[in-house]
């Protein structure tokens, strides 16, 4: 983020961050949501805290915050409410052609309670990540995620990369073998340039983005979630280790 912010400053640009996976990460002692000009969080069902659907934007700029509030609900000015009537009055003014992007009150109520548990959820995920790290450290077929010392990883996902040159199976077969042992995994994500729409629209080929294509072939997200028991974690470790050992070159 430091170089990104420097470049933005030099060119008088604003930095809007996608922090959908980053709660509660931090960077050089600063929590996500306090670094860029605007930071966007996702509270979709799969995220580190959830409101079922929806999200949150943070900014230090009160003008932008007010604008976001207004545009998220039909462009209705809240100032107009305050200025002319008591709060809760029938009166309102539409100042802009806004959207219907508001979080429902029910979702917000869930979010407030979820937020209280955010660090507690993180502690569990962090512990699971540490157990995985230690268990896989001796398997050269598995490349682990790392976190620099000046950062806190949110551990929303635990992504490993397979050293395919050391294995006789590819990533898809690896996932299939895990599934056969009752372990559900996923791949985060399929790069945009491999999706039909982007291939058709922009003529992209896999080789156009060789790093993304190569990482995509090797990545697997292992289970990590607060309700995971130690036995669950051990079962994942056992399955991964067994598949690796059975398929070593
Ligand atoms: C990196 C990233 N950004 C943004 C989103 C979108 O989140 P939402 O649609 O909940 O705002 C996602 C959802 O998975 C994501 O993974």
Image (cartoon, rainbow, N blue to C red):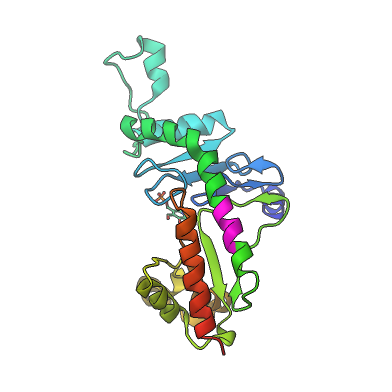
Q: Does the rendering let one see residue 21?
A: yes
Count of number-bearing discs: 0
Question: Of residues 96 and 249, which is closer to you in this image?
Answer: 249
Range covered by the magenta-colored residues: 127-132
Residue drawn at point x = 31 percent, y = 14 percent: 88
Question: Of residues 170 and 18, which is closer to you in this image?
Answer: 170
Q: Is residue 77 above or below residue 123?
A: above
User: Which secondary structure class fits the magenta region best?
Assistant: helix
Residue 14 image point, x, y percent:
60, 46
Q: Residue furthest front?
A: 231
Is residue 128 in the magenta section? Answer: yes
Residue 69 image point, x, y percent:
42, 31
Residue 242 image point, x, y percent:
50, 77
Q: Is residue 187 above or below residue 89?
A: below
Is residue 166 in the magenta section? Answer: no
Residue 238 image point, x, y percent:
50, 70
Residue drawn at point x = 40 percent, y = 72 percent: 198
The C terminus sits in image quarter: bottom right
């Amino acid at each position: 983020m430091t170089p990104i912010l420097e470049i933005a400053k030099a060119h008088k640009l604003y930095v809007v961050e996608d922090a959908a996976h980053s709660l509660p990460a931090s960077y050089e002692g600063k929590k996500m949501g306090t670094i860029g000009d605007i930071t966007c969080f996702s509270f979709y069902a799969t995220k580190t805290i959830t409101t079922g659907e929806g999200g949150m934007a943070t900014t230090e700029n009160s003008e932008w915050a007010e604008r976001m509030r207004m545009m998220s609900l039909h462009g209705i000015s809240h100032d107009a409410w305050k200025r002319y009537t008591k709060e809760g009055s029938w009166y309102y003014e539409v100042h802009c052609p806004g959207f219907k992007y508001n979080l429902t009150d029910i979702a917000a109520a869930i979010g407030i309670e979820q937020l209280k548990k955010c660090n507690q959820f993180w502690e569990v995920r962090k512990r699971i990540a540490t157990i995985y790290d230690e268990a896989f450290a001796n398997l050269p077929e598995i490349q682990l995620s790392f976190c620099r010392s000046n950062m806190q990883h949110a551990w929303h996902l635990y992504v490993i990369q397979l050293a395919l040159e050391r294995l006789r199976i590819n990533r898809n077969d690896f996932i299939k073998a895990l599934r056969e042992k009752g372990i559900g995994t996923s791949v985060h994500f399929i790069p945009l340039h491999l999706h039909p729409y982007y291939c058709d629209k922009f003529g992209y080929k896999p080789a156009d983005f060789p790093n993304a294509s190569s990482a995509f072939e090797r990545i697997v997200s292992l289970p990590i979630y607060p309700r995971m028991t130690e036995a669950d974690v051990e079962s994942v470790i056992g399955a991964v280790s067994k598949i690796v050992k059975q398929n070593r070159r």
